[in-house]
Amino acid sequence: MASIHHTTMAPTKLELLTDWLPKQTWYVGDAETPELVKAGGFRLDDPEGTVGIEFMVVVDATVQEPVAYLVPMGYRGAALEGVPGEALIGTSEHGVLGTRWIYDGVHDPVVMAQLGALLRGEAMPQHQSESDTPDPTVTVHGTGPDDRLDVQVNRVLRQAEAAQGSSGQLVAGWTWPNGTTARGVLAAVAPR
């Protein structure tokens, strides 16, 4: 299982996301510089132990009605080849591991493979900030993707439990800036 290093990152993940998020087509805010707050998330383990995998929920508090976004991230020790330029969220100096290339997880094959494994019941969600600690609040409803299905990541999160009768939905929670909690579908299987 992945080890969480309690150390510094410069720039921080939230600083990188503050610059990156408004450039995304799915960003619904109107601020060029959103006020992001870490609101939830979880981690997955890379079976090879080389890519850090985190699913972070951030809330933009600059809008009248705060908006929650899901940003899956892959942390790598070297640049990832063959991905579009916008896939790179940024680089950061990690206090233990050195330079880390942080990618939007939907463009990282290891991140997406592990998300598929989670939806098939072949991977276990891990606590976002504690080593070797499963996160039982992250749940999968139904069965995951097969050769005929893809995984769709919900970028803008809405409060809702899994739809009745739906197959392969990943549900997790986050906390709004006022302290109330919410749960919603973070990812789901979709036909190709």
Image (cartoon, rainbow, N blue to C red):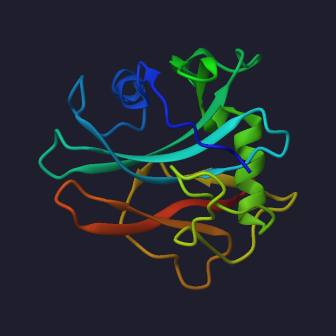
Where does residue 27 sit, x and y in percent of width and height? Answer: 36, 36
- The residue shown at (76%, 61%) is 123
Q: Is residue 109 left or right of residue 174?
A: right
23, above or below 46, in the image: above
Where does residue 178 sit, x and y in percent of width and height? Answer: 16, 59
- The residue shown at (64%, 22%) is 97
Q: Is residue 101 left or right of residue 77?
A: left
62, above or below 31, in the image: below
Where does residue 165 sit, x and y in percent of width and height? Answer: 61, 84
Q: Is residue 88 left or right of residue 161?
A: right
85, above or below 161, in the image: above
- The residue shown at (75%, 55%) is 116
Q: How many marks?
A: 0
Residue at the far bottom: name it: 164
Where does residue 108 sit, x and y in percent of width and height? Answer: 70, 33
Q: Is residue 64 left or right of residue 106?
A: left
- The residue shown at (23%, 67%) is 180
Residue at the far left: name it: 64
Residue 91 location, quadrant: top right
Q: Nearer the viewer, residue 161 or 1?
A: 1
Q: Nearer the viewer, residue 126 or 55?
A: 126
